[in-house]
Amino acid sequence: MYKLAGELFPVCRSITGEGTRTTLRRIQKEIPHMIIHEIPTGTKVFDWTIPNEWEIEDAYIEDADGNIIVDFKQNNLHVVGYSSPIDEWVSLEELNKHLYSLPEYPDWIPYVTSYYKERWGFCVAHNQRMSLKDGQYHVIIKSKLFEGSLSYGELLIPGKSNKEIFLSTYVCHPSMANNELSGPVVQLELAKWIQNNKERKYSYRFIWVAETIGAITYLSRNLDTMKERIIAGYNLTCVGDERAVSYVSSKYGNTLADQAARNVLHFMYPEYISYDFLHRGSDERQYNAPGVELPVCSVCCSKYHEYPEYHTSADDMSLISPKGLQRAFDIYKEIIMSLEYNTKYKVNCYCEPQLGARGLYPTESFHRSSVTVKDMMDFIAYADGTQDLFQISNRIGVPVTRLHEIAQTLMAADLFSEVK
């Protein structure tokens, strides 16, 4: 995951364009069944319209002595995303109207875009901005805005049921690691793992889209099917660093996706930070929108907006790590396994079953002899066919994956039946 993120880090992505297609094609090499869709410029998608495609070849600022002082080829964050083309000499006063910097982080380059209003601009470190001297500056942005398309990737993995678990991430930011590339590479590995798991109960819908406009476009084309089939979904973003584990709830925090996320995090990372939907900021906004109402929440590492490097040049490959990516993968893998295993069970006899006769309980009774099978006994006590594994797990303090193991043992002994 980390190696692939490093490979894709230099690519200049935006909500449309070749950078996004390059990224999607690279992911497609890993999962050839992924389909890349192209939706034409001007297409109405609910209340939005897909904008012109943006292409950029080069951009720089040159001083009066011919020195290039800001260079897109050195860092693609230097140009405001979707900047209009320009080739002009301007004064420092005029240039400053088109410069963006962060006084609070004077050595970092901010990430700025202007998708839906034509303008041009450059992003620079504040210290550099303050060092600029009076005079004339040559600003050049070799870009194009033209009728093209918006690209997104989609992978559907069928299971025994047509009910689906949905995973979404975005591929629309230039060179940032945690905020951009961690989601796509973790989601890719989850897709490969699920493809290799032939005993999956549910079907899986994966998408790699442009944030906001891409999610809206996808929903506009698939909403009826998604509402009919999706039982739980997750928006994967900011899942690469090691500093925090965070959870962002769905709109009301009461979906199966929320239950699974909270349950797994309680056992794996009980110190996780919980954020209400009022602190949303990514595509969970679209999936929870009125009329859409999909059961989608998010598990992050350091959540967007909550770490200082967010949307800056400091969100580089040093901010994420193989360990951080693996941690996120393991969390989502446990969530998916818990959803696969979740069901209701009913014990097949009245009163406590005689476990000792089946080799499931110590045959000698002594102080604390029942501790060794306490999880099993507690599970049996609540296996009345009305509680699913998440409910029982929360009550008795045993992870769903462990309850699944116990249930398989008890079913093999003809003591449990699954309630359909």
Image (cartoon, rainbow, N blue to C red):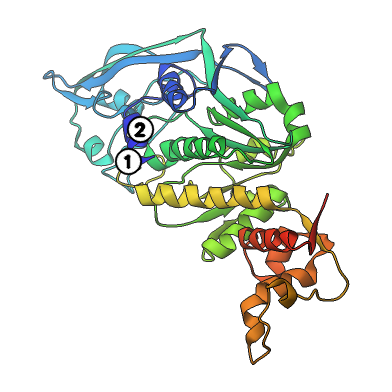
> Helix or strand or loop: what does disc 1 sit on?
loop
Percent coordinates x, y for residue 382 in the rendering: 79, 69
Q: Is residue 91 above or below residue 203?
A: above
Extreme-left residue of the structure: 65
> Helix or strand or loop: what does disc 2 sit on?
loop
Q: Residues within 10 Å of mark 1 (few under 14, many from 20)?
A: some
Q: Residue at x 56, y 38 (%)?
A: 194
Which residue carries the number 2 mark? 175
Q: Are marks 2 and 1 in contact (CB under 8 Å)?
A: yes
Q: Residue at x 64, y 37 (%)?
A: 166
Counting residues from the start of the chain, the first of labels 2 and 1 encountered is: 2
Q: Is residue 146 left or right of residue 154?
A: left
Q: Is residue 249 above or below residue 288?
A: below
Percent coordinates x, y for residue 227 in the rendering: 76, 33
Judge by depth and name the residue closer to the eye, 61 or 187. Answer: 187
Q: Is residue 153 left or right of residue 391?
A: left
Q: Amino acid at mark 1?
A: Asp
- Residue 63: quadrant of the picture: top left
Which residue carries the number 1 mark? 316
- Residue 74: quadrant of the picture: top left
Q: Is residue 313 visible?
A: yes
- Residue 48: quadrant of the picture: top right
Q: Residue at x 57, y 59 (%)?
A: 265
Judge by depth and name the residue closer to the eye, 55 or 230. Answer: 230
